[in-house]
Image: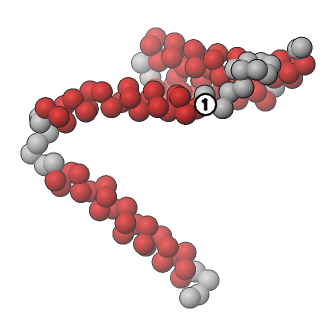
Amino acid sequence: MGELSYPLAVIGVMAAATFPTRALPFLLLRGRENHPLLVYLARVLPAAVMTILVLYAVRDIELRQVPHGLPELLAMLVTAGLHVWRGNALLSIGVGTGLYMAMIQSWVAGWWLATP
């Protein structure tokens, strides 16, 4: 295979595998939008997925080392508070992520790490 044909073939195989898996639920569930199971899943899955994502994000926090997860906790509180206050996911996630990155990349992280 040529230099360009291999990456194109890989992308083609990935597209051929991904497209049907994304389209199949819409094709199979057409006309069943009000099925009780689907209504239930639409109601509970967003909170379940967010819970799993939060637990995954904080799984490696070292509570025995300074700063004891303080940047993560503050960022989560700011994110949750902003989302409750404004109801804008993009704003709350963006500000929470920015705050977290600022805390771990700035002098604040050095101050926390220097504290005995």
Q: Where is residue 38 in the image (x, y as percent from the top left)?
A: 19, 36
Up-down relation of residue 22 to residue 58 (above or below): below
Mark 1 Cα shell of 10 Å, populated few (<14), some (14-19), many (≥20): few
The image shows residue 98 at horizontal and vertical percentages of 65, 27
Q: Name the residue under label 1.
A: 59
Q: In this view of the protein, can residue 99 be seen by the observer?
A: no
Quarter of the image holding residue 69? top right
- Between 28 and 9, the one nearer to me in the picture: 28
In the image, what residue occupies the spot 70% across and 17% down? Answer: 70
* Above or below, 70 relative to 102: above
* Left or right of residue 39: residue 83: right
| Residue 93 in sight from this viewpoint | yes
Label 1 residue SS: loop
> Seen in the image, is 54 located left or right of residue 42?
right
Instruction: Give the percent coordinates (x, y) of residue 1.
Output: 56, 88
Q: Which of 89 and 40 is in front in this view?
A: 40
Among the 4 quarters of the image, the one containing residue 77: top right
Residue at (61, 31) in percent of width and height: 59
Residue type at numbered disc 1: Arg
Rendering coords of residue 106 (x, y %):
81, 25
